[in-house]
Image (cartoon, rainbow, N blue to C red):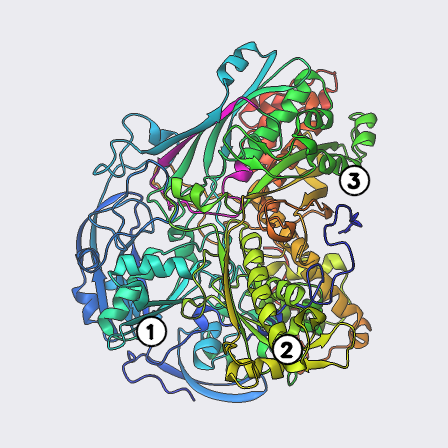
């Protein structure tokens, strides 16, 4: 879909078809383009941020087929046939989603650069079902770094979101678009 | 975590806060856009036909650049422009310094290395191409010949005779400058003292590591002579000045814009080489050029911080009263003088909260072949706190005194304030001892001291450590800054402009980087003007649309801006009431602004909406004859002095005396930030700073290989900042003593948390291991460093030999491994 500027160096492009935030996208991308750059530069979805391009900081976390994925560690061509959700998919109309609202109410962000990573990690965590304890939340979100908040309010916001959501609090009920087939790949301590 | 109830005491504001005013915990203005992925960070700015820059960097710590051949790179399809050292020298001036070291020469620092590079990562050439991929491909095609030169990375070794000199054209050693501040006769007091405790303390090199790296987008319109520079910076107005100087432009030719900034913490203060390079390329190409730093570059070419070696002494009489305190320290500035250089506040608060009449601090600013050092949250204050607080505990142990009582006895009393310390800082107000007592009570000090050192069931020993501190927030004055050659003032400014929707537009040069200034500014306006918080819209960080200001650093934004906000709001309110009085045919003194209307205090039915009044003013229709149209005010404000925040931290730690492994079981911080505008924001700032303090204390250390001069852990998988799973339980307590030197009695709040974690944890460990005679003197504190200290001094006086490591436990079979 995205036409490249005329003076771009020709490199081998690979046609890829993927669903991003519910919209089917067919695009030819360079083989070496990673998903975070694809989302930002080709689709204009700049809510996904890039912090290290090494899978260590978690800024670029999105959901692919319901799992949290560090999108700097995945090539755009690997999205072929898969379903991507970014932070832009969370708010409905002009209303923050309950998770976003919990972040706002609990002052769980300062500069906000890391927030999309935490929001998508928490969303993917909910897809696993169950209602994690505070300590489990700490471990699960430890794959995303924040240099501003000291994390306490992020943990509180996610805990509150789980507690206030009856279908999530009831074990085993996986909402959202997709059903996970295996555990999330991010989270846990480095 | 537990947030204990905070007692409200000498609270200057008295009654309940007005909704949205000072003291209210309102929703943040910044949040919705950031949570929806709709922030506008510099990398999100994507002008049409933008090109991308990549930078070739010196791989050696010290090398002569013999040759740069860009022929093959220029020939690569998609490459638009290449810059090398001579071209940069022809087109620009050396980078300027904003906070010079007094007495230091100007180093000839261009955006690209000229002849010699002095640290790994220094820019040597830059390429612009149609994509970052292609630009980086082109870097591979650059043919650069280096001649490695002898290097030095250790700060003390750099001062030795015979060390390779980094800047021989302007200096004959690596001592860039030495400054001494002090008063009294400390050497005489040292001679008379019953006891002198002293040690050499090594503070490790760390980095601020904002989650958003540096970034710049430069656009040049030659016909308009306008250079627009989007930058992730804390100081848009200061980089405008620096860019104009360096690029040989008029300041009016440059517009700097910082919309959302993904964390700064002092690192994003001023112009970096890459900013100049992007502008030079954009000017040459007449096309927009973007550069977003990658993390490998960030670790090598932004700025590092804190590294210093302090020789500290405290002299006391037999009762523990401090007679004198001195600090002679070498602070590492790296290979070049960054805009803010190495930390300058170690000398200012060298005595912490203690009454010291005789003392001095001597600073030796030292060049090494490492990444330049810049400002970082705390700016010298965590470093000295680690040293003097460890010595205070040693003094207590040597004199067999309670460390809490020793501290209390020596603290500056509330009734003695304001008080000038030996290096000339004037502590404004506060009750330091009260914070100490509250911390001791909250952590359970008396019970711990009574219990003795019985190991826990798992064999661990428990210890409690304290760290009391003061924190300078803001600057003493523009006069103080002028004496030190600083290229900025001590004031803040704001423009308020009424709009036809009945709201106020607020323009500020303070960029938004997580400090919640949009929210706090709007709260002050709501408080003073009376308008709804929601009706204030903050436009931040654009030099084309804000009054000249100083910027967001040194915990100074609110303490200076609050005065400007108050003044601008009062001016605007006065005219608004006058306009309303004319409309309502009454006396302005009978009117009040509240929410979205102006009304009579005694008869609420007599009112006019702000939307209507503002429209009258803007159109000049419906105002009194002779009244000037328009409704806008600009105010500048400089506080009368710096405000000193203060507090005490207490850490409860458990230590395994066999392995040195330890856990911070509880951490209490009692802190005073004066009058609080928004408690949620203040707590968030304190917690965030504590997390950085714990990182620097326990896990963060940038290590250089002395043989190769290479940074060995320059990536996020090798440099460990705390994750959500790493921080101890933190309890916050507050006191609220308003500062007499700022509007509303505010003190700065951004940096305090970085100061006490290292000393409190180290003191807790030394308390737990007191029977082993373990003393610590370097950061970070690790199980290994404790184990080594245990190995060196495994001479427990009681015969519990099973607790001490035996020779069989040690590699190579003995002490001294």
Pointer 3: what residue? B442
Q: Nearer the viewer, residue B408 or A34?
A: B408
- Is B698 rendered above or below residue B290? above
User: What kind of element bears circle 2?
Assistant: helix
Q: In this image, A51 relative to A115: left or right? A: left
Looking at the picture, how far across and down is residue B556, in whole percent? 53, 51
Looking at the picture, how far across and down is residue B710, in whole percent? 37, 44
Q: Nearer the viewer, residue B17 or A185?
A: B17
- Give the extent of the magenta segment: B357-383
Q: Nearer the viewer, residue B407 or A38?
A: B407
Looking at the picture, how far across and down is residue B509, in whole percent? 47, 63
- Is B635 rendered above or below residue B66? below
For the question of whether residue B190 can be seen, the reply is: yes
Q: Nearer the viewer, mark 1 or mark 3?
A: 3
User: What kind of element bears circle 1?
Assistant: loop
- The answer as to whether the residues below labels 2 and 3 share one chain is yes
Q: Nearer the viewer, mark 2 or mark 3?
A: 2
What numbered label is drawn on residue B131? 1
Q: Report crowding for label 1: few under 14, some 14 to 19, many 20 or more residues within 10 A (C-alpha).
A: many
- Is B814 rendered above or below residue A43? above
- The answer as to whether the residues below labels 1 and 3 share one chain is yes
Q: Provide the chain ID for the residue under circle 1.
A: B
Find the distance from the CA under tag 2 to the CA under tag 3. 53 Å
* Image quadrant where residue B789 sits: top right
Q: Provide the chain ID for the residue under circle 3.
A: B
Q: Is residue B361 magenta?
A: yes
| Residue under the image location 73 percent in, 75 percent down | B600
Pointer 2: what residue? B580
What numbered label is drawn on residue A102? none
Find the distance from the CA under tag 1 to the CA under tag 3. 57 Å
């Amino acid at each position: 879909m995205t036409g490249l500027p005329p003076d771009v160096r020709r490199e081998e492009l690979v046609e890829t078809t993927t669903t991003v935030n519910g919209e089917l996208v067919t695009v030819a991308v360079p083989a070496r383009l990673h998903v975070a750059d694809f989302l930002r530069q080709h689709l204009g979805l700049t809510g996904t941020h890039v912090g290290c391009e090494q899978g260590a900081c978690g800024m670029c976390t999105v959901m692919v087929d319901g799992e949290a994925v560090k999108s700097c560690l995945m090539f755009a061509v690997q999205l072929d046939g898969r379903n991507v959700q970014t932070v832009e998919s969370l708010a409905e109309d002009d209303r923050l989603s309950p998770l976003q609202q919990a972040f706002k109410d609990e002052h769980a962000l300062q500069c906000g650069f890391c927030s999309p990573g935490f929001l998508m990690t928490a969303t993917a965590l909910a897809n696993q079902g169950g209602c994690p304890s505070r300590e489990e939340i700490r471990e699960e979100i430890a794959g995303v770094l924040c240099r501003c908040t000291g994390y306490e309010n992020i943990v509180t916001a996610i805990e509150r979101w789980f507690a206030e959501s009856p279908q999530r609090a009831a074990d085993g009920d996986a909402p959202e678009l997709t059903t996970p087939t295996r555990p999330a790949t991010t989270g846990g301590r480095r | 975590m537990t947030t204990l109830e905070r007692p409200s005491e000498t609270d200057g504001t008295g009654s309940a806060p007005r909704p949205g005013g000072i003291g209210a915990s309102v929703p943040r203005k910044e949040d919705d856009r950031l949570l929806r992925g709709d922030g506008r960070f510099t990398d999100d700015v994507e002008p049409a036909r933008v090109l991308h820059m990549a930078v070739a960097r010196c791989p050696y710590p010290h090398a002569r650049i013999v040759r740069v051949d860009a022929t093959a790179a220029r020939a690569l399809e998609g490459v638009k422009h290449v810059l090398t050292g001579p071209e940069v020298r022809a087109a620009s001036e050396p980078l300027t310094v904003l906070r010079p070291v007094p007495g230091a020469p100007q180093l000839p620092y261009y955006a690209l290395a000229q002849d010699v590079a002095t640290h790994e990562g220094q820019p040597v050439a830059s390429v612009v191409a149609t994509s970052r991929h292609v630009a980086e491909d082109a870097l591979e095609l650059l043919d650069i010949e280096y001649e490695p030169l002898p290097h030095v990375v250790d700060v003390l070794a750099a001062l030795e005779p015979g060390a390779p000199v980094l800047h021989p054209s302007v200096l004959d050693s690596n001592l860039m400058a030495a400054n001494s501040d002090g008063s009294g006769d400390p050497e005489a007091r040292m001679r008379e003292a019953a006891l002198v405790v002293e040690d050499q303390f090594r503070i490790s090199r760390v980095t601020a590591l904002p989650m958003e790296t540096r970034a710049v987008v430069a656009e040049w319109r030659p016909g308009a002579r306008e250079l627009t520079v989007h930058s992730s910076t804390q100081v848009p107005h200061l980089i405008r000045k620096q860019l104009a100087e360096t690029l040989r432009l008029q300041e009016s030719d440059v517009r700097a814009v910082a919309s959302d900034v993904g964390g700064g913490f002092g690192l994003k203060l001023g112009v970096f080489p890459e900013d100049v390079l992007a502008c030079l390329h954009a000017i040459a190409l007449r096309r927009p050029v973007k550069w977003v730093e990658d993390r490998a570059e960030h670790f090598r070419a932004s700025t590092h911080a804190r590294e210093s070696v302090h020789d500290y002494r405290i002299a006391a009489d037999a009762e523990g009263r401090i007679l004198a305190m001195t600090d002679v320290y070498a602070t590492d500035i790296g290979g070049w003088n960054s805009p803010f250089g190495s930390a300058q506040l170690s000398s200012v608060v060298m005595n912490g909260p203690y009454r010291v009449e005789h003392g001095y601090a001597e600073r030796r600013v030292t060049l090494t072949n490492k990444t330049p050092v810049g400002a970082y949250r705390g700016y010298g204050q965590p470093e000295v706190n680690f040293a003097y607080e460890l010595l205070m505990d040693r003094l207590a142990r040597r004199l067999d005194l309670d460390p809490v009582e020793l501290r209390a006895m020596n603290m500056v009393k509330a009734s003695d304030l304001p008080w000038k310390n030996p290096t000339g800082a004037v502590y404004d107000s506060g009750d330091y001892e009260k914070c100490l007592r509250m911390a001791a009570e909250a952590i359970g000090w008396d019970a711990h001291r009574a219990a003795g050192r019985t190991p826990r069931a798992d064999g661990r020993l428990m210890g409690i450590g304290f760290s009391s501190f003061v924190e300078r927030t803001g600057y003493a004055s523009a006069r103080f800054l002028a004496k030190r050659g600083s290229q900025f003032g001590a004031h803040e400014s704001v423009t308020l402009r009424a709009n036809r929707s009945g709201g106020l537009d607020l323009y500020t040069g303070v960029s938004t980087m997580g400090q919640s200034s949009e929210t706090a500014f709007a709260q002050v306006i709501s408080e003073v003007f009376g308008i709804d918080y929601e009706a204030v819209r903050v436009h931040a960080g654009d030099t084309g649309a804000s009054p000249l200001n100083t910027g967001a650093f040194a915990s100074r934004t609110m303490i200076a801006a609050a005065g400007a906000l108050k003044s601008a709001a009062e001016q605007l309110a006065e005219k608004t009431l006058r306009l309303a009085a004319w409309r309502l045919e009454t006396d302005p003194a009978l009117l009040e602004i509240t929410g979205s209307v102006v009304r009579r205090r005694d008869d609420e039915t007599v009112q006019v909406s702000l939307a209507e009044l503002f429209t009258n003013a803007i159109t000049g229709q419906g105002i009194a004859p002779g009244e000037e149209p328009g409704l806008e005010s600009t105010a500048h404000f400089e506080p009368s002095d710096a405000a000193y925040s203060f507090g005490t931290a207490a850490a409860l730690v458990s230590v395994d005396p066999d392995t040195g492994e330890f856990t911070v079981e509880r951490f209490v911080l009692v802190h005073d930030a004066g009058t609080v505008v928004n408690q949620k924001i203040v707590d968030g700032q304190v917690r965030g700073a504590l997390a950085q303090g714990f990182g620097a204390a326990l896990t963060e250390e940038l290590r250089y290989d002395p043989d190769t001069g290479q940074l060995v852990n320059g990536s996020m998988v090798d440099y460990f900042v705390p994750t959500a799973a790493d921080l101890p339980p933190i309890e916050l307590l507050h006191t609220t003593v308003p500062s007499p030197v700022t509007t509303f009695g505010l003190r700065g709040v951004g940096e305090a948390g970085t100061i006490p974690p290292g000393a409190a944890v180290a003191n807790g460990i030394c308390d737990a291991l007191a029977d082993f005679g373990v003393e610590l003197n370097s950061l970070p504190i690790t199980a290994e460093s404790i184990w080594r200290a245990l190995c060196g001094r495994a001479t427990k006086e009681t015969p519990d030999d099973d607790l001490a490591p035996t020779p069989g436990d040690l590699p190579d079979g003995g002490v001294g491994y």
